[in-house]
Amino acid sequence: MRYGIAFKLGLLLATFGVVAMGIVGYYSYTTSRATLLSAAQRDLLTATQVLGRNFKTSIDGVADDAMLLASLPTTPAIVGAEGQTQTATDREKKVLSDTFAAMMALHAEYFQIRLIGAGEHGQELVRVDRDADKLAHVPIADLQEKAHYSYVFNTLRLGRGQVYLSDITINHEEGVHSGLHKPTLRVATPVVADDGRVLGLIVINLDLNGLFARLQSDLPNTYQLYLSNHWGDYLIHPDPAQAFGFDQGRRIFIQEFFEPVASLISGQRASVVTSIEGAQQSQDGLVAAFVRLPFGGSVDKHFVILGLSQPLENVVRETRRLGWTTVQMILALGAMAVVVAALVSRAVTGPLRNMVDAVGQFSKEQVVSELPTSDNDEIGLLAHSLNDMQATIVANLRELNESRQALKHLAQHDPLTALPNRALFIDRLGQAISQARRDQTCMALMFVDLDGFKAINDTYGHHVGDCLLITAAQRMESCVRNVDTVGRLGGDEFVVLLNHVEKDVDAVLVAEKICQALHQPFELEGHHMDISSSIGVAIFPEHGSDEVTLSRSADAAMYQAKESGGNRVRLFGA
Amino acid sequence: MISRLLTILVAGLALSLPSLAVETLRVLTWPGYADSDLVKAFENKFDVRVEVSFVGSDEVLREKIGANQGGNFDVFAANTAEMQHYIGHKLVMPLRLSNIPNTAQQLPRFRNVRSIPGITQLGEIYAVPYTYSEMGLIYDRKQFEQAPTSLSVLWDPKYRGRVLAFDTSSHNFSIAALALGAKPFRIEEKKFKAVVDHLIALRRNVLTFYTLPEESVELFRNHSVAVMFANYGGQQLKLLRDAGADVGYVIPVEGALAWLDCWAVTRGAGNRDLAERWINYMLDKHVSGELTRRQGLSNTLEVDTSTQESDKIIWLEPVENDKRRAALWGRIISGDLPKQF
């Protein structure tokens, strides 16, 4: 009974409850995590696409500025007029230079604006550099030849209104002031004469980091920006050391860390989302979205990869809280499950327990306790059967007891008079002697013999004799106290036992009283008859200190009474 | 130029700091010398981690090895001309050839290390040859009826805007000097201005100066390039032919500069034995063979048949003043006019 059915049932129910809770909790945790993740990826992708559009819009704005500068009347005049009156062009250069400066004052991300001639090996004609917080109008003596740079020879192939975007590189051109060794995007457009000849180009050097710092300012500051060229070399990376690796003789590719980006580079897709679980300690998880932005001239079909990432931690923080809530719920519900299981199992096993108790009590004390049988189920049926069984057993037992009592009575009493028989009387005599010896008191034993009984038996028959014996027994019993005993030894011999006799005479008085009672006439079966009795009295311990001696003394006294003519009492030794 | 190199130096330092793991071999080499599958095989064979960093120019290599007394890398590849710099600055350790048994399989001219200038000093061997390449001229067969013969084709106004040169200081000064009939590695002071002017003339004749071999392929395709100075030699030729270009390759009569890249162990090497094992692995027949097969570079184990006996090969030597060349080159490529020098 160490692990009762209640315990086992409760354990089973509780386990089932907790496991079910756990599964539901885990499922809802993973589902909501996936939902949050994909929602975050969608948000990031949207943000990236918007950022990409803003980037394009910004570039378009720069291109518009470049085209505006290219279309100013002074611009082709300067390029076309090389070699004409020096003073006139000098004046026009001054005007254009001021225009450049005014534009750069408006646009903090412009590093440099130049007018470069198509001839003279790409000779710079007008150049304004940003130099810290000043603008430097570069003197003619410091102007350089740029024809061998890709932004020059590619732009010179274009027509009016077309724009060339250079690959984004670190600008190592010496003498460029603030733009030196900075990530730079060059936006260039040709300067075209009325006859369609390309005379030169306007180049605006754009501060890539400055531009993105502005674009990124609208985004949450947990978002991190990535930009790569069409080979996958990082141009912008949250860790600046990872950007422009190729400029330092090593290549760090975006697709090596964000593997799905390879499909953007190969052109299979236009956007990807990905998440990187923080497997290593040094690397936290990321959710990221990337888009491929066509970029630059149509000849080389270049593009950039723009991406935003967000720490996975931020995204799944909600999920973590949900997970914690789930754990708490599981704990609470688990505890509840244990309680409910305990209650349920008690409800189920309570009646069983009651039956067990009832059966236990029944077998111990034979007390019938009524079991509740109101339930119409198996347990009710079982209780019902147990009740029936108890009732049957009790009835049988009672019958058995009664017959045993009857047998015992039969063994110890005279069937005719219902007085104790010899066996019971000897037993009581022994007890009375022991009692008297212990209490140091006296007790009396009388032998009573009916005189002339044989004649009545012979005259009126045994039936009348028996009736007389019964009546005589009743008369004797009426003469003694309840504590005293009248017994029949057989035939017409009776014995009387008087407990606690003060004096001899008290016993003799009782004997006299019995003798008189028996001497009263009997009316039996229509016959009138008189008998008498001879009574011998012996006192303990005076006339015998044990059963045998005392009986012999009483017997002897009775014979003396009989021999003296009967109808009298004789005290032993008197 | 100096500040650019400083930037690189600082970046190199920053990058190499987290890589100081216990059994890590830090290799600094050139693209194509240590493909990831071959590196992986080495890692598995010796149960180590290999960190490979690549360089694109001798200048960057010098700065990276020079930083932290060579302590940022264990083993690197440099050409013979550069080795004297590393030996002179005590940035490299003598090699124990007994630890590099594969050297016994090299061709006699490479096995006889003492005959190769620049890699020994005071009887100690500091570098083991690995691969070599001469810098010839690659030309478009469609634009040349006859293959060009002289370096002067780079200056030929007929091909103006269709010439590609390489963005590097030392070699450009050397080939300009060669084209002028001067000594390539020891330009005399009085001839310096002429060489600078000649480089400006080159600048005015080229389409552009390229940096990466892939870049030269892209430019070749998109801008009908006629001839280019092949800084990457056979490697570059293979890349162009793989891209479908109909190109030829010549060694100019003035001679072709040729580099012989050797492996050396830095004085700051964490595990000298491991570094030497790496060198031995690089001289394995399979690994050296793969270099030739994949990159079109000649290895030191098999006889090369692409160049002829009569071709004039000029092994690279240290130049008179590389800092000066670099500073001048920075201004030349930025577009300074002759009068500004």
Image (cartoon, coloured by chain):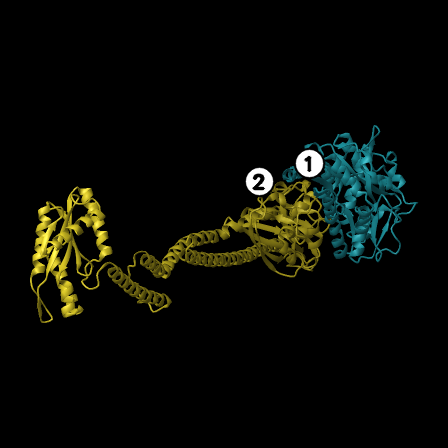
Q: Residue furthest right?
A: B310
Nearest-to-viewer mark from 2 and 1: 1
Q: Secondary structure at mark 1?
A: loop
What amino acid is found at the position of numbered circle 1 in the picture?
Answer: Asn
Residue B71, image x and y in percent?
69, 34
Q: Secondary structure at mark 2?
A: loop
Residue matched to label 2: A132
Viewer-nearest residue: B311 or B47: B47
Residue A262, image x and y in percent?
65, 56
Near mark 1 (Cα within 10 A), the count class, few <14, some 14-19 or many ≥20, is many
Viewer-nearest residue: A28 or B200: A28
The chain to which mark 2 is attached is: A
Residue B4, image x and y in percent?
67, 39
CB contact under 8 Å: marks 2 and 1: no
> Residue at point 8% right, 60% down?
A519
What amino acid is found at the position of numbered circle 2 in the picture?
Answer: Ala
Residue matched to label 1: B72
Q: Is residue A243 left or right of residue A429?
A: right
The colour of chain B is cyan
The colour of chain A is yellow
Q: Is residue A304 above or below residue B193?
A: below
In the picture, which quadrant includes the C terminus of chain B?
top right
Q: Is residue A403 visible?
A: yes
Q: Residue furthest bottom?
A: A526
Q: Is residue A451 left or right of residue A9?
A: left
Q: Is residue B180 visible?
A: no
Viewer-nearest residue: A553 or A380: A553
